[in-house]
Image (spheres, helix red, strand yellow):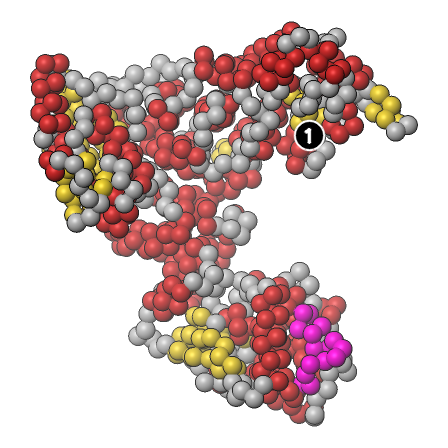
Amino acid sequence: MPLQQVWGNGRTQLVIPVYQRNYAWKIENCNQLFADLVKLKDSRRSGHFFGSIVTAPAGSGLDRLIIDGQQRLTTTSLLMLAAIKAVKDGKMKASHEGLLEEIHDNMLWAKYGSHPSHKFKLLPIEQDRVAYDRLFSYDDEQFIHSSKITRNFNFFYDKLTSTPNPFTFDELFDVVDKLQVICIDLDNDDDPQLIFESLNSTGLALEEADKIRNYLLMSLAPAEQEECFKEYWRKIQSATDDSPTMFLRDYITISDNLLRPVKLNGLYFHWKKYMAQEGRERKTELASMLDYVRYYNMISTAQISLLRDGQWIKSKRLSKKMAQLRNLDTDVINVFLISFLKYAIEANFSEDEIWKVLDLVEGYLARRIICSMSSNSLTQTFCALHRDVLRSITEYEKAGRELTLPYHDILAYHILRREGNFRIPRDEMFAEAILTRNVYQMPKSAQHFLFERLENFNHTEFIDVKKLMQNGDATIEHIMPQTLTSEWRKELGEDAESIHAQYLHTFANLTLTGVNSELSNNSFSDKKNGKIVNGQFVNGYQGSIYRLTQELMAYDSWGLAGLQDRAEKIKDKLMSLYPMPQTSYKPVPRPVEEISLEEEEFNPTNRLLLGYRLFGEEYQQSYWIDMLINVVRELYRRDPDALGAAARKDMWLHEKMTDDEKKYQKIDEGCYLWKHVNNRNKLSCLRYIFDELDIAYGELILYVEPQSPDSAESVESAESAE
């Protein structure tokens, strides 16, 4: 049908629901539409397909909600508004004044509309409505030029008033009249959410947050939509700087007790599944989200406030500590930080206790970064840490035992107990890494973080190293240059090459400067004292604002002795900043030991399996091989495609049996499990499969107890021989 018919009569208004996203067409989208219209004018075609429009009743009147198509409807109205202004300004020709009035009255105006304060045909959402309404004044001084609405209006105006002008007003109207759409008018019995999902399953560019917002608001009555949007969603959007998707992922991870965040491309469908559990009510969920987003905002802005006597009071000390954590530019810690801050503030923790917890997290990350261990691998650890601490507190309560230790002491225990890929490096490993780590090729965020901490170590006057480095006002400089000159070979002595290779990119040989290019390959004396370059004196280290650089004034020369001395001093600073955590906490003794799959150092030798817990369901099982097979079968039942893909990689799982069939367990056609392994390798097999399926190790808990060595050996031998 022609697009013109969608606009209806003088009583019908087209309402963009509050749950829709803001007007978002870019200049290139508008340019493409304009080019299509020019081609249509020059062709003999009778029409041009312009997509689909889906409307639904907006209450009991004639008004229609725009479920899909708001971008196209808004853009065509901007085009015609721009054309009317061009005619009024004498920059575009129209055959007669009556045509302007016809377009204005039929396409842009709702003379008898039901909204007393707003008689325009189209009612954009609140953030866009003011800018849109101002365009009807046709007065540039009243326009809101920061709005995308106004920006695209101006784009069309410029196109229509350019030389040569591709259209007269009459020609433009005729071409717009040829735009054809598929219009779906829903009634009160239709489910607009299902229509919305089917339309957006074809790849239309909606953020996951857009889909979740629509899901939460779309099924509500119009009045409730308006209330929930203003009371909850608009505040959530504001607290996340208009980008709520990452917060929503953290929120669902916390609220659904997940041990690994949902993948972003599956966030919307996981959210629907979550809401269906226990019949969760939308308004209640929005209120909960608004509560949690306060803590997300504290983290993302590094502005921590504490609730004291009903008042929120900003903590400069905690905000500074959070800013240090944010310098790492990682969001793997957010689930923990949101959960912890909410718990701590509601429990009225002291500022000092909260600081100690944040400092523990910083030390955990810093030690791993310096030891070249990825922080991304800690995603599931930080999803579980707060829950681990609460579980320890609960276990003491259930045992009727008093637990007087603070939160940070229990947290330290749970950090220290982690092994393998999740461990915190011990002092010997940490100290060695400080001396040898290639710091120059670290990620920028790690450099910003570490050099800020070193520069401001034990100083009250703060230098914002990250900001200076991002602005290009500070750079990391090699003291001993990357390319040795003859002068530097002489400075370093007969072992110049080996010294250069060993220390070049380490902490010992790096400093901060703003004059990197001027003195980069000069002698140590010139770098230290400065020199005249191109007729101007360039300050050396003695004129630096950076304390790390001023410290170099204590050295008369730069060779092995100086490098070793500076390396030790930086090591002492970092060991002081990030001491090994200490804990007095001891877990409540259990008759049965619970082992998570994430405990990579666990040795199942001499352990009797009693059962296991998988995805919260408990199973009795005394044979390790049966546990392995049953777990893999359950994983296949949940996601056969993913497990089938893993089998095609021929690692623990295989598409075909290529050896003695007794060594395999058939899971399904094209998926065979290699089972001829000892118990330790059974766990390695499961970790591999969990990684392939993106499942947190913590979803599998084994119940074990000690067993006599002779008995254990016979059981394991029998299982491996099956």
Identify the residue at image location x=38%, y=63%: 201
Identify the residue at image location x=67%, y=24%: 482
Residue bearing mark 1: 475
81 or 114: which is nearer to us? 81
Q: Residue 620 lies in what quarter of the image?
A: top left
Q: Quadrant of the N terminus?
A: bottom left
Magenta stretch in the rendered image = 154-169
Residue 211, percent across and down?
41, 59
Residue 467, percent across and down?
66, 34
Please indicate whether residue 719 sits to the left or right of residue 92 in the image. Answer: left
Q: Quadrant of the C terminus?
A: top left
- Residue 705 position (above or below residue 104): above
Is residue 701 among what the camera can see? Answer: yes
Residue 13, percent across and down?
50, 78
| Magenta region includes residue 159 | yes
Please indicate whether residue 696 sits to the left or right of residue 49 in the image. Answer: left
